[in-house]
């Protein structure tokens, strides 16, 4: 997979993209991640990437020209029709695990990182841009939202995580939260690991974990549990 991130603030992204699971994916060459600094696509001496909104009002808006230039630069290297352009935005569809799975099957993702009040709307007139939201709250940086999506997608790529079954059985698969997990020591200050997990009976353990997944989802996320119930009918 190739992931390109267009940003006016590459410093927000550089360290997280070189740590943990994403670092492993890049080191194994399973995913290639490139940062495109919007300021490199400006044409004034101040390297301006934003301006005041037409019609007045508070805040600043990212200019359309640097973004278009950056995208065209990418498409000089890669086929335009194979790329999915994503814009983290409160106006987008809510991102979830199923969306992460879908994106993990793509070969080329491009993220446009908004800032301030957002991006000049005319970007949609030049390219097909998919707006996507990571939740009903506002961030000062689209880079943070892009990082969350990149992390959730990269970890699903075969070979990034040693045990891919671990990734595919995490919370939100099958519309269920994951079961609780324990590790050593077996007893800590009087708090013990459930005996079923020490039994060695894998069938019973699997049954217990499924029961816990359903119980926790029913209690903590009734909306997810309702979807789960519909899926098994």
Image (spheres, rainbow, N blue to C red):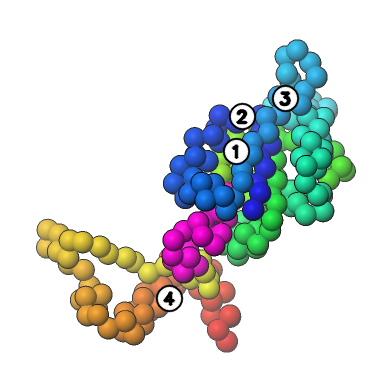
Between the C-alphas of marks 4 and 3, the distance is 50 Å
Between circles 1 and 4, the one closer to the viewer is 1
**Cβ atoms at labels 3 and 1 below 8 Å apart:** no
**Cβ atoms at labels 1 and 2 below 8 Å apart:** yes
* Disc 4 crowd, CA 10 A, few/some/many (<14, 14-19, 20+): many
Residue 224's disc is none
Q: Quadrant of residue 88?
A: top right
**Cβ atoms at labels 4 and 2 below 8 Å apart:** no
Determine the residue positioned at 73% across, 18% down: 47
Q: Up-down: is 31 above or below 194?
A: above
Between the C-alphas of marks 2 and 3, the distance is 11 Å
Residue 144 is situated, as x and y percent measured from the top left of the image, at 56, 40
Which is more toward the observer, 73 or 112?
A: 73
Residue designated by label 1: 143
* Residue range (magenta): 149-170
Label 1 element class? helix
Residue 232 is situated, as x and y percent measured from the top left of the image, at 55, 84
Residue 135 is situated, as x and y percent measured from the top left of the image, at 58, 51
Residue designated by label 3: 40
Residue designated by label 4: 214
Label 2 element class? loop
**Of pointers 1 and 4, the one earlier in the residue sequence:** 1
Say whether residue 222 is magenta: no
């Amino acid at each position: 997979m190739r992931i390109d991130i267009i940003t006016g603030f590459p410093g927000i992204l550089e360290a997280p993209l070189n740590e943990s699971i994403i670092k492993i994916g890049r080191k194994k060459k399973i995913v290639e991640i490139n940062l495109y600094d919007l300021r490199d696509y400006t044409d004034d001496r101040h390297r301006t990437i934003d301006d005041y909104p037409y019609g007045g009002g508070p805040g600043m808006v990212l200019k359309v020209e640097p973004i278009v230039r950056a995208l065209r630069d990418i498409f000089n290297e890669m086929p335009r029709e194979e790329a999915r352009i994503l814009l983290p935005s409160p106006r987008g569809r809510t991102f979830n695990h199923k969306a992460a799975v879908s994106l993990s099957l793509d070969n080329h993702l491009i993220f446009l990182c908004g800032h301030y009040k957002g991006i000049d709307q005319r970007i949609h007139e030049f390219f097909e841009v998919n707006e996507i939201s990571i939740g009903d709250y506002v961030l000062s940086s689209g880079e943070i939202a892009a990082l969350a999506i990149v992390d959730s997608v990269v970890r699903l790529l075969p070979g990034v995580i040693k045990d891919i079954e671990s990734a595919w059985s995490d919370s939100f698969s099958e519309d269920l939260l994951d079961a609780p997990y324990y590790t050593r020591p077996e007893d800590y200050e009087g708090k013990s690991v459930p005996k079923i997990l020490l039994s060695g009976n894998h069938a019973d353990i699997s049954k217990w974990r499924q029961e816990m997944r359903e119980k926790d989802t029913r209690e903590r996320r009734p909306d997810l549990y309702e979807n789960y119930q519909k899926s098994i009918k």
